[in-house]
Amino acid sequence: MAIDFHKYANPTRFLRLASAVFPWVTGAAVLLLVTGLYMGLFVAPEDYQQGETVRIMFVHVPAAWMGMSVYTMMAVSAAAGLIWKHPVADLSAKAAAPIGACFTLLALVTGALWGQPMWGTYWVWDARLTSMLILLFLYLGYMALWGSFDDHSKAARAAAILVLVGAINIPVIKFSVDWWNTLHQPASVATLDGPKIHGSILTPLLVMGAAYMMLFLSVFIIRVKAEIMDRRLQIMKISQLQE
Amino acid sequence: MTRKKRRLYTLLAGMGVLGVAAALVLYSFEDSLVFFHSPSDLAEKPVPAGRSFRLGGLVEEGSVEKDGVIIRFRVTDLAESVPVTYRGLVPDLFREGQGVVAEGKLDENGLFVASNVLAKHDENYMPPEVAESLRDAGHWQPEGSN
């Protein structure tokens, strides 16, 4: 085992690491985002059937990946918070939630804008679209739950349980297009017999995926830092009141 | 240590039970979770005339007939096929050989009267030149190449 993750459950150590990687992650996010958007919007060829509309995919597909990945990461954090009571675990899930919600919303909106010209409708209640909408509601419910408790540890527990119960939805989203017939197309990139997207269209897609990942990490670090500071402030206030 | 272990196992057991429950629910609701029925589904389990449902499959090659605003075609899954009639505009991706989902009802003669027609896109993405060369090499018949 190369990295001992439990070590980074210590907030001070976590903050030190986060501050060290922050400029790199942010720089990479800007660079990859500019490259990915340029490649996607200007370099990539149009699709043989969709024409220029295919370019929506470069914003849509990685956003959907991030919506699901961020949720998965929150579920792992929440489990770590429940089992090992790591102080950073719950805060990291809390900090990630609004970012994941934004990616999910972006995927839903861009998907609708693609659906209108291609399918002939903005929205249908098929299994993929519906499970993705449920994901957005899970994010919103999670954030609302944090806001509805005064006691930090109670809020953390309740929110963690909600995230874990909702985690069932993640495999449902991924496999919805295989288990049931849907209007949404099946997987194009993560398939057993390789991607079904031509290299000239696949490359900008993967660059955008990496860009979103770096963007997430950058915003995530800012938010976790703020959460840790906020938590310290609360504890200081409480101890002052007790004196 | 034992407490952490116990919490870990409780959590794993809880997730396991939840997973099984979710699987059972999804499995039992399968009929309402599918977005459309294929012509083969229809042959197996006929839907009575006048009940709304969605019919999905490929637009059969050579079956599209346009008559003003009325369009007639057959939806096939390469085993069975159903005739469809629709009055209105079809989406850009509506082509022969391309995936389609039609919403509507069967009439007494087994003709599907669609109230809405959606095009279904497949999972293949490529530039036009690549589609062209694949077709020329005879490796792959692009859908809707006409």
Image (tube, coloured by chain):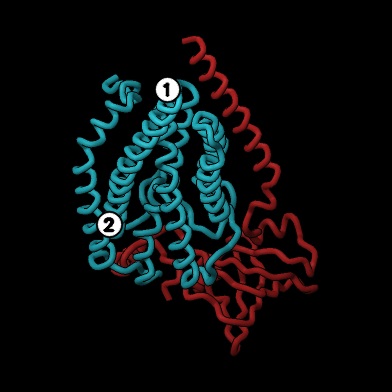
Chain colours: A cyan, B red
The image quarter containing residue A203 is bottom left
Q: Position of residue A50 (x, y in %)?
A: 40, 69
Viewer-nearest residue: B52 or A17: A17
Residue at mark 2: chain: A
Q: Position of residue B68 (x, y in %)?
A: 59, 90
Q: Is residue B22 above or below residue B109?
A: above
Q: CA distance from mark 1 to mark 2?
A: 59 Å
Quadrant location of the C terminus of chain B in the rendered image? bottom left
Viewer-nearest residue: A243 or A157: A243
| Labels 1 and 2 within one chain | yes
Extreme residue in the top direction = B2
Q: Position of residue A111 (x, y in %)?
A: 46, 62
Which label sits in the foreground, 1 or 2? 1
**Which secondary structure, mark 2?**
helix
Q: Is residue A188 above or below residue A96?
A: below
Answer few, some or many: residues within 10 Å of disc 2's Cα (few below 14, many 20 plus, some between 14 and 19). many
- Residue type at mark 2 is Pro
Viewer-nearest residue: A23 or A197: A23
**Which secondary structure, mark 1?**
loop
Q: Position of residue A204 (x, y in %)?
A: 27, 57
Viewer-nearest residue: A42 or A147: A147
Question: Which label belongs to residue A204?
Answer: 2
The residue located at (62%, 57%) in the rendering is B35
Left or right of B23: which side holds A4?
Answer: left
The residue located at (64%, 66%) in the rendering is B81
Left or right of A106: which side holds B7?
Answer: right
**Do we see residue A27 in this rendering?**
yes
Q: Which residue is denoted by mark 1 in the rendering? A: A243
Left or right of A184: which side holds A230?
Answer: left
- Residue type at mark 1 is Glu
The image quarter containing residue A201 is bottom left
